[in-house]
Image (cartoon, rainbow, N blue to C red):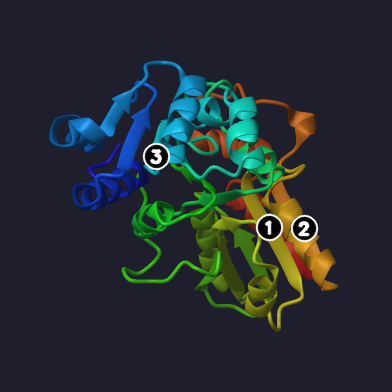
Amino acid sequence: MSGKKTQRDAFWDRVFELAREDSDIVLVTADMGAPSLDKFRTGLAAQFINVGIAEQNAIQVATGMAMEGKKPFVYAIAPFITLRCLEQTRVSNSIMDIPITIVGVGAGFGYEDSGPTHHMLEDIAVMRSMPNIVINSVSDNVMARAVAEESVKSTHTNYVRLDRLPYDDIHSPGESFVDGVGVVREGGDVCVVATGAMVYTALDVAGRLDGRGVSVRVLDLYRLPVNGAKLVELLDGVDKVVTLEEAWLPGGMGSAVLEAFNDLGERKTVRRLGLDHAKGYSYVYGGRGLIHASYGIDVDGVERAVMETLEA
């Protein structure tokens, strides 16, 4: 791993800065370690709780603190803080609408060599199926810091999905993220709507297709429920759309986009790219690139799919 700061550290560094000024901000962790978390352990010990490897308990502790007026953040590896805690989140946070911020690290294939138990492929579909939960699918460090600030003020439950690996920033400091979706590259022939780490794949594909005379617009869809009106506005003039996600296709971001189009009566040619259930869970080892290639969502596969969509 390079020396670049990860989304995790950018996010928690900002939470720590805010927590120094607000004693109601507390961090509940399920035995996770990181240099940015060490600041809490040593500098804000009264605002740091480690419940051990007990994610379900972490959700309940955070919920109880929220009921007492605190602003809790609860943190663990993404599949364990979402799927393992599904009933607790459903009952305490969705049904009762008690606001906490659930932070999962390792979205998609972030834990690339740890196998299916650590791959987070279902969270978008599962979490967006419940009311009173907002999903923040973070793409870079600028967004991570902004989401940290917004989470402190949230009146509903936030789910923040962070990538484990470092990436270059694609957003500018001070940029607003209130719309839930934004343009990261202009283009007029076809649009790729991507989320999380797949925004970088979309940008790589768009760069390649420049050389073939194809102009690709790239949107970063970073919040669900989808802001359908804004999405349609940003797609003005483009009728062919490819959605791209590092998640199972049923119920995922692409499904949410299609639902938004349908609800608004918008007619677009849409192709969804993601993980096909027919291929099952991944036991491919050797890195994220090889996993993506096995599912056809690497740069080569996406480039082919975009051209097929454009030519259809």
Q: Mark 1 touching mark 2, by CB under 8 A? A: yes
Reading the image, the residue beneath label 3 is 73
201 up-or-down from 2: above or below: below
Reading the image, the residue beneath label 2 is 271
Q: Nearer the viewer, residue 170 or 205?
A: 170
Residue density around tag 2, few if under 14, some if 14–19, many if 20 or more, within 10 Å? some
Q: In this rendering, would 36 be left or right of 247?
A: left
Q: Residue 296's spot in the image, x, y percent?
A: 67, 43
Of tags 1 and 3, the one toward the viewer is 3
Residue depicted at x 42% and y 71%: 176
Residue depicted at x 62% and y 40%: 96
Q: Nearer the viewer, residue 156 or 247?
A: 156
Reading the image, the residue beneath label 1 is 243
Q: Is residue 63 visible?
A: yes
Q: Residue 164's spot in the image, x, y percent?
A: 40, 38
Q: Secondary structure at mark 1?
A: strand
CA distance for labels 3 and 2: 36 Å
User: Farthest residue toward the top?
Assistant: 53
CA distance for labels 1 and 2: 6 Å
Residue density around tag 1, few if under 14, some if 14–19, many if 20 or more, within 10 Å? many
Q: In this rendering, would 129 be left or right of 211?
A: right
Give the mark nearer the N terminus: 1 vs 2.
Answer: 1
Residue density around tag 3, few if under 14, some if 14–19, many if 20 or more, within 10 Å? many
Q: Residue 103's spot in the image, x, y percent?
A: 45, 39
Using the rendered view, name the quadrant where residue 66 is placed: top left
Given the image, on which type of amino acid does mark 1 rest?
A: Thr
Give the mark nearer the N terminus: 3 vs 2.
Answer: 3
Q: Is residue 312 visible?
A: no
Q: In this rendering, would 307 be left or right of 31?
A: right
158 up-or-down from 266: above or below: above
233 up-or-down from 146: above or below: below
Using the rendered view, name the quadrant where residue 305 is placed: bottom right
